[in-house]
Structure formats: C-alpha cells, structure tokens
Amino acid sequence: MVHSKRRAARALTILGAAHVATFAATAVDAADLPVKARSQAAPVSNWTQFYVGGGLGFDFSTGRSRLAPVGGGADLFTLDGLQGADLGLSAFAGFDVQVAPRVVVGGFVDYDWSRQRTTVNVGGNGFGQSIAASMPSLDQGWTIGGRAGFLATPDILLYGLAGYSQMRINNWDLNYTILGGGPSFTAQEPAVNAHGYTVGAGAEYRLASNVSLRGEYRYVALGRNTTVDPLGAVWTTDLSQHVIRVGAAYRFGQFGGPATTAAAPALSPVWTGVYVGAGIGGDAITPHVAASVPGMLDFNAAGLGGADVGGTFTIGYDRQIAPKWVIGAFGLIDVATNGGASITANGGGATITSDLASVKWAWTVGGRFGYLVSPETLVYVLGGYSGSTARSVSYNLLGVIQSTSPEREYHGATVGGGFERFFSDRISARAEYRLTHVETRDDLTDGFFTSLSAGGTIHTLRGSLVYHLPTP
C-alpha cells in the first residue's frame, strides 16, 4: 500500500513536470511569433471654425459702354471687350461648419481693392480728332455670401460659392475734340456703386490646425449702370468683374475631433533632388503702349491688358539645408492662348478694333527659398529672370490705320511665391503666383507707325503637379 502511494506521487510529479515543460515550450514558441502592432489613431477632420485672411492676384473687367447724345439719337461712342487688368488685394473673414464627414458649409465676407486704371489717348494734326479717355475700372468692393464644399481629403476642401456684391467703379473720363476749331465735349462721370451677384469656385488646403491656403476664382455680374453728365449725355455701362486670388487664412479653434480612425501611413518625402512638373492657370497683362507718326498721329495706352489661359512646364533641383529650410534652382516655360480677347470702339462714325496683349510663351530661370511648415509641406518665395514673347496684335484705327504689330521678346525680373505639398513619397502639388515686370522696348516699328514702344507687367497664377526623381 505504501509502495502504491509512492508510485502515484511519482506519477503526479512526472505529469506536473511534463505540463510545466509543455507550457514553457509553448511560451518560447509564442515569443518567436510576430506581434501585431496596435493600430494608431488619427483625429477626424473637423472644419467647424472661424477664420480671417488675405490674398492677392488679379482682376479684369469686361463689358460694354455706350455714350448717348443729349436728347437721344445714335450712340456717340461705344466700347466692347476687356476693359482693364491689374493686381488686386483682398481681405476676408468667415466661418465653416462641417455638417457631414465630407461636407462643409459656411459664410464669408470679402473686401477687394484694386488700382487698375486704363487710359487711351489718340490724336495728332493729321488725325483730325482727339480722344482722351479713362475707362471704367474697379476701385474697391465687398461681397457677402456662402460656400459649400467637399473634402477630397481631411486637409483639402473643394468648394463652390455664391453671394451678393457691391463694387465701386471708377467711371468714364472722356474728352472728344474735332481739331481745327470743330465741336468738342468732355464727359467726366462720377464713380458708381454697382450691385450684382457673385459666383465662383476654389480649393483650400490646411497646412496646420490653424493655417490654411486657398486659390479662388469669382465672377461678379454688376448689371447695367447709367449716369448723366453735366451736358446731358448719358453713359450706360454693362460691366462684369473677374477676380482671381491666392490667399492664406488663420483659423480659430482646434482642427480635429476624437481619434476614431486608423492613421494613414506616414509619408517619407525627400526634398533634396531633381524634379519635373507641369501645370495650368492664367495670366493677366497690364501693358503700356505708345506709337506715333510724326506730324500726323499719336497713340498712347496704359493699363489696358489682356488675359489668357496658360500652361507651365518646369524642371528644378532642391536641397534641404536644415530641418526646416529648403533652397533650390529652377527653369520653366510658360505657354498661353489669348482666348479671343479684343476691344472694339466706335465714335464719330469711325471704328477702332484691336486684339489685346497676351503671352504667347515665356521662360524663367531662378531660385526659391522655402520653410517646411510640416515634413511634407513647403511655403516658399521665388525670384528670377524672364523672357516673355507677346502674341501679335492686329488693329484697325478708324479705317485708316490697319496693321499687325511684330512679335518681340521682352525681358525682366520675376518675383513670387507659393506652397507645395507631397501626396506620396514622389508626387507633390503646388500653387504659385508670379509677377514679372518687363522692360520697355522701343524697336517695335511696323508697316505704319514710325515709332512704337511697349512694356508692362505680367501676373501669372499656376497650379502644378510635380514628380521628384529618386536620389542616386
């Protein structure tokens, strides 16, 4: 009996040791298995915030203006087409409410300034008439409205907008004289406050919780406005304003809600290296032109600019010189199309028609210097030297002077800025504004004018996709 108890105890001891050994072996095997990492969480986008900001870009006016004589009758003067383009500034404020995971609505108010002022002078002893005019142009204005957008990503909002605008328009200032003692009249119209609707679209990218960048286009229909000068002549103007802006906003409050979604894989952008890119956008030109035939005709125009749709091809090299700083060099080519921008003026039974200045193609070489607001987002300034070839301009002045201006390349300095963000380890998107001031050329004589000179300023906005080549 005693021996039986001893055998049972020994069996239990062996069985227990076997269990311990088996557990230990299992634990060792488990230690060799891959461990599933705990999924990280990212905040849900939340665009419910107030914001203030500012922007810059260009404005241009289109429309038709008519001058009717005292007591009625045929129009003394009409002007159809683009009536000026120049640099403009904006300040804005508003609020957004995110009403669904991908839908944002909000309200805003904008205030715009511009100093575009288009002047034309045509005269001379052999001309028989003298016309000096300042055309309608934007002085300042405001818009109040709303926007609704779709979140393409938690940081990128694509939106449309609509609102109501009031624009203060610098009105006509016209002096028309028949030389040699003939009749003349002067019309200096007071500025008008024009009202109308605004529609547009844009994209906004959030750089950080409280900072965002946007690009926006607005069309402002200002309707028909009528003024009567002291002589009783009646000016009627149908005017529309086109506003293109890039801007930055400071947003109050915290972006992001509870951490409920898995975080996207972190990007590993490399800013040092060679890149190539292509983009699309627009240009606005503010030229000044002077032409003459000694003893017969003098023509001067300033501020009257064309607008076009253009594309860009670029290549460059960047180097990250510090954790937050990037420098680089680049070369680019711009190509553009006028889109049929032209002007037609009728007065005294005579007609003036002309295309408007526009870029045919241009090149720029320069450098840029930027600050990394995040590892994948660069805000930068740029500078360089440019050559711009203007498209030929065909004109007909009063049925007497018909010619086509020669194509020439204009050179000048370029400055600007923009931002760029990586969306993958090799592909980034950028938005950029450039201003080029070209020199005046006085060797532009054509088949009629013995003296012809031109120069001016080119405003360029572009959005581009960029591919960064792998580093060796």
Image (cartoon, rainbow, N blue to C red):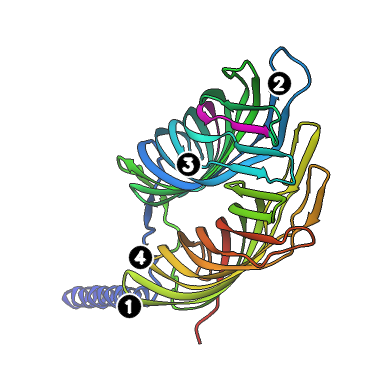
Q: Is residue 368 above or below residue 454?
A: below
Which numbered disc, 3 or 4, marks the residue that appears first in the sequence? 3
Q: Nearer the viewer, residue 11 or 359?
A: 359
- Badge number at residue 68: 2
Marks 1,2: beta carbons within 8 A:
no
Quadrant hosting residue 372: bottom left
Residue at label 1? 28
Going by the numbered disc 3, the residue's amino acid type is Arg
Going by the numbered disc 4, the residue's amino acid type is Tyr
Q: Residues within 10 Å of mark 1 (few under 14, many from 20)?
A: few
Give x and y (percent) for residue 394: 78, 53
Going by the numbered disc 2, the residue's amino acid type is Ala
Which numbered disc, 1 or 4, marks the residue that appears first in the sequence? 1
Q: Is residue 190 above or below residue 259?
A: above
Comparing labels 3 and 2, the label whose residue is closer to the camera: 2
The residues bearing labels 3 and 1 have C-alpha atoms spaced at a distance of: 79 Å
Which numbered disc, 3 or 1, marks the residue that appears first in the sequence? 1
Which segment is the magenta one?
160-177
Going by the numbered disc 1, the residue's amino acid type is Val
- Badge number at residue 115: 3
Whether residue 62 is visible to the viewer of this picture, yes or no, is: yes
Q: Is residue 133 above or below residue 422?
A: above
Q: Secondary structure at mark 4?
A: strand
Comparing labels 3 and 1, the label whose residue is closer to the camera: 3
Residue at horizontal 40 percent and vertical 33 percent from the top: 94
Residue at horizontal 72 percent and vertical 61 percent from the top: 450
- All told, the count of numbered labels is 4
Q: Secondary structure at mark 3?
A: loop
